[in-house]
């Protein structure tokens, strides 16, 4: 009996010893990667004791080295003329700004009338602010006072893929031709309706515009709804990140091809630890009119909302706003596909229309120094506003020396 107790005790002790060793080893090895931190890095991050690193300090040590070249802060302001706020009219989701014959041009979503929602008669009601819209355009001499010029692209005939609404437009100029890409919805506009992307082209920014006979981009078809109730959260299978809607299209000529960036909405969308499950994708074509082939690397973002992309330093830069854990970051990729975070910002205006006339060689965020955005007065009425941004290098008090750019 005594003997067996001794054996048991030794087994337990040995076990404890080996457990302790395992624990020690675990602690020692996970700390290993932080053991060679330079004093300069500790000093920069303000870390008190490298032998007692908090989880947050470890994350800070894991961050890649970054300059503050991509950091900026924004302010928004009212525009004048026809784009000043007007109750009863929805003007939203403006395109980028281009300059032709000495005038700035923008295109945008326009509709009138209040929002009824989905509870009533969807065949006659207006279900969203962007329902029953056409694409209009406006011009300006100074980017502040705008003249509304009229419709550019209207909804299609009954039965066409764009018969219910055309909205959220972007502009591209390529070899003296102008291309508008935009979202389309076909009636009936219920909560499960798929949204597609259409394209129109013209020889002048004032039109006339020729529309593509078919959409140039459609949602993935590998999601399966559960039942027939109009509920977009009920699914048998969610499918790809863009199984429900392809939105916010923007085409950039890049590396001899045409990169169509877009926002995907997924069937059975969830609220995650970063908010709405929204991600971006890209589809690539040899010609502006397509055919566009979705990249096998999609989704190329894990966050974001309206697409805001531009060519920068030989690659593509993106402003990621609104949804997801990486919202409010500026990102850049050398190949238009693999994006890394360059800056985390306080927030940014939504649905930005970039200033495509900017000299992007001046600064990585020069294209965002000014532009257009939209704002909700309330759910019925949205209007287009201007924004400015500034790069920020110092945080100084009034009268303190040191200045911002
Ligand atoms: C926008 C865009 C798309 C959505 C809606 C209108 O800002 O993301 O266009 O459909 O909101």
Image: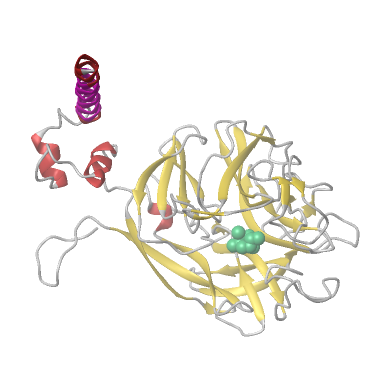
Q: Residue 358, position in %: x, y?
A: 44, 53
Query: Is any part of residue 202 visible from this angle?
Result: no
Query: Is residue 175 placed above or below 396 in the rendered structure?
Result: above
Query: Which quadrant, please, contains the N terminus?
Result: top left
Q: Residue 280, position in %: x, y?
A: 57, 46
Does residue 16 belong to the magenta stretch? yes
- Helix, strand or loop: magenta stretch: helix
Q: Residue at x 28, y 42 (%)?
A: 59
Query: Is residue 244 placed above or below 298 in the rendered structure?
Result: below
Q: Furthest residue to the front?
A: 1
Ligand 1 location (quadrant): bottom right
Residue 244 or 393: which is nearer the viewer? 244
The answer to whether residue 172 is left or right of residue 333 is right
Q: Furthest residue to the right?
A: 159
Span highlighted in magenta in the image: 9-29
Residue 250 or 271: which is nearer the viewer? 271
Q: Residue 150, position in %: x, y?
A: 71, 71
Q: Residue at x 54, y 39 (%)?
A: 300
Q: Residue at x 33, y 57 (%)?
A: 72
The answer to whether residue 146 is left or right of residue 216 is left
Query: Which quadrant, please, contains the C terminus?
Result: bottom left
Residue 274 or 286: which is nearer the viewer? 274
Residue 244 or 329: which is nearer the viewer? 244
Q: Residue 166, position in %: x, y?
A: 74, 61
User: How many tags in the picture?
Assistant: 0
Query: Is any part of residue 138 visible from this angle?
Result: yes
The answer to whether residue 353 is left or right of residue 129 is left
């Amino acid at each position: 009996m005594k003997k067996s107790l001794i054996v048991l005790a030794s087994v337990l002790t040995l076990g404890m010893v080996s457990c302790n060793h395992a624990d020690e080893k675990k602690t020692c090895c996970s700390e290993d990667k932080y053991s060679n931190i330079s004093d300069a890095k500790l000093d920069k991050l303000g870390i008190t004791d490298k032998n007692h690193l908090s989880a947050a300090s470890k994350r800070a040590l894991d961050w890649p080295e970054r300059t503050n070249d991509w950091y900026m802060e924004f302010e928004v302001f009212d525009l004048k003329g026809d784009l000043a706020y007007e109750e009863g009219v929805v003007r939203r989701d403006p395109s980028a700004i281009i300059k032709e014959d000495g005038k700035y041009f923008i295109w945008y979503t326009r509709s009138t009338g209040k929002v009824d929602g989905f509870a009533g008669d969807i065949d006659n009601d207006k279900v969203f602010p962007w329902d029953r819209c056409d694409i209009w355009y406006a011009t300006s001499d100074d980017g502040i006072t705008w003249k509304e010029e009229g419709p550019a692209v209207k909804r299609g005939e009954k039965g066409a893929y764009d018969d219910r609404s055309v909205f959220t437009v972007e502009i591209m100029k390529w070899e003296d031709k102008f291309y508008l890409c935009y979202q389309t919805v076909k009636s009936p506009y219920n909560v499960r309706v798929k949204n597609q992307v259409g394209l129109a082209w013209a020889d002048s920014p004032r039109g006339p515009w020729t529309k593509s006979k078919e959409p140039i981009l459609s949602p993935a078809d590998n999601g399966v709804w559960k039942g027939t109730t109009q509920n977009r959260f009920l699914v048998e299978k969610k499918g790809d990140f863009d199984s429900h809607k392809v939105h916010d299209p923007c085409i950039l000529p890049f590396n001899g091809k045409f990169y169509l960036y877009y926002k995907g909405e997924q069937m059975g969308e969830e609220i995650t630890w970063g908010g709405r499950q929204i991600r971006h994708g890209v589809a690539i074509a040899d010609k502006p009119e397509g055919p566009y082939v979705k990249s096998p690397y999609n989704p190329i973002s894990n966050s974001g909302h309206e697409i805001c992309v531009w060519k920068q330093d030989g690659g593509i830069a993106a402003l990621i706003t609104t949804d997801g854990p990486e919202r409010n970051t500026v990102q850049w990729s050398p190949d238009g596909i693999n994006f890394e975070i360059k800056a985390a910002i306080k927030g940014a205006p939504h649905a930005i229309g970039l200033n495509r006339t900017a000299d992007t060689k001046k600064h990585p965020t020069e294209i965002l120094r000014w532009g257009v955005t939209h704002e909700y007065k309330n759910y019925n009425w949205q209007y287009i506003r201007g924004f400015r941004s500034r790069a920020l290098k110092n945080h100084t008090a009034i009268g303190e020396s040191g200045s911002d750019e």
